[in-house]
Image: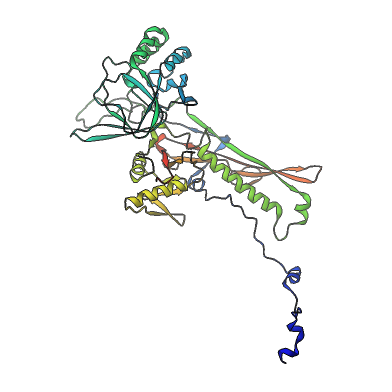
Amino acid sequence: MSIDSAPEIRSGKQQSLGTAAARNLATTTKSVPQMQGISSRWLTRMLPWVHTDGGAYRVNRRLTYTIGDGRIEFSQTGAQVRVIPQELGELALLRGFDDVDVLTALADRFVQRDFEPGQVLAEEGTSADHLYLLAHGRVHKTSSGHYGDTNWLGVLADGDKFGDRYLLDAEPRWEFTVKAATAGTLLEMPRREFIAILDDSPTLQAHVQEYLSLPEQRQNKHGEAEIALSSGHVGEAELPATFVDYDLKPREYELDVAQTVLRVHSRVADLYNKPMNQTEQQLRLTIQALRERQEHELVNNREFGLLHNTEFKQRIQTHEGPPTPDDLDDLLSMRRNTQYMFAHPKAIAAFGKECNKRGLNIGTAEVGGHHLPAWRGVPLLPCGKIPVSEHQTSSIIAVRTGEDNEGVIGLYQTGLPDEVEPGLNARFMGIDDRAVISYLVSTYYSAAVLVPDAVGILENAEVHPRG
């Protein structure tokens, strides 16, 4: 048949069933509900989780002699910065001193001072006649080496101080040099002002006398009470007697909770369950959201989160700004057997760029079948729960894990009523007069740092590219 003999084809008349109508008789293939907020949750996956009876975990340690070595906090009004009087108790000399009037008088003696990059704030060998509190900025601390070279002593940043150890000395001299690496602000108080307040305050005099009269406690480099031992002797030498003293007030970690009430209408639960169960899918996505919140708390919670529960001695600053191989080497050297490092993806990218500048290979490690960035064989795992500040700085967390390894552990309780996953349950709450079914979904968790050097942090690492 010729084309001319088929006018119905030329006119475009439909010859078969259209796809739009055919879809009415077809069965579609559906995905389960998707959720963009699900992350890799490497921190949750890498922590060993320990069952915690009674909802609390007590960390017993050897007795440690604590001195005031924490960070100092400040109040700020506009450009004016002032030290909070009670924060002066972080100075070793003033630890435990609670006379607010005297502390306020000391705080009033501090004068604000801005500094510029390259400025020398204290010079080795000169008179140490001031106490300095670093409110903002980064400074480098160095000293002269034995052979005339320069020894790197570290970086001081927001909340650090220097000069406090010389307050009671007659003619103190700086034993190191402090040089500004960035612009910043500090508060300074002349040593003579402290002496004047000391002379006028009987309570401060009594506190200082008590401080000076304390017997020197024998302790190891970690501050733990020393265990007396003898070695290298011959014959019938008298051996020292000793015992291992324990901390009288060990810390207890209580399980925290994240909860929500999941509601599903009975009509939906009854009629719309094929091919997928609506209640199961609602619960699955709710659990994912709770697990994301759980990991966020493991990082950021002020009671047990790693960012807030790492000792100040285990925190270091970057040498210049971005995280460099030298910075990560310093972080790794602070503890034995570092197993993992966690960083925001932007921080990992910034570290990769610094390696590229130096022509270094960042390396990889296999973790759970995944090939991930690594440094010195230690996996550098992404954790988007680590915050990036408004100044585009972040932190890198290094951890050792496990009870047997005296590391960091996750805490949970298993065997809960109506348990859906370990440490997570969904309990039926009933049906209200609007035919809405309610389930209480709860997850219980915490984290414990068994010894201080189990976790360390590289702070204030710049994550944006420099121009």
Q: Position of residue 83 (x, y in %)?
A: 45, 22
Q: Position of residue 454 (x, y in %)?
A: 41, 38
Q: Which image quadrant for residue 199?
A: top left
Q: Is residue 70 above or below residue 338?
A: above
Q: Is residue 28 left or right of residue 102?
A: right
Q: Is residue 24 left or right of residue 35?
A: right
Residue at 39% over, 35% down: 314
Q: Nearer the viewer, residue 415 or 99?
A: 99
Q: Position of residue 42 (x, y in %)?
A: 49, 48
Q: Nearer the viewer, residue 178 or 283?
A: 178
What's the colour scheme? rainbow
Q: Nearer the viewer, residue 403 or 6?
A: 6
Q: Is residue 320 above or below residue 7?
A: above
Tell me if residue 413 can be seen: yes
Q: Is residue 176 left or right of residue 132?
A: left
Q: Position of residue 208 (x, y in %)?
A: 37, 13
Farthest left residue in view:
147
| Total number of numbered discs in the rendering | 0
Residue at 37% over, 15% down: 211
Q: Which image quadrant for residue 153?
A: top left
Farthest bottom residue in view:
1
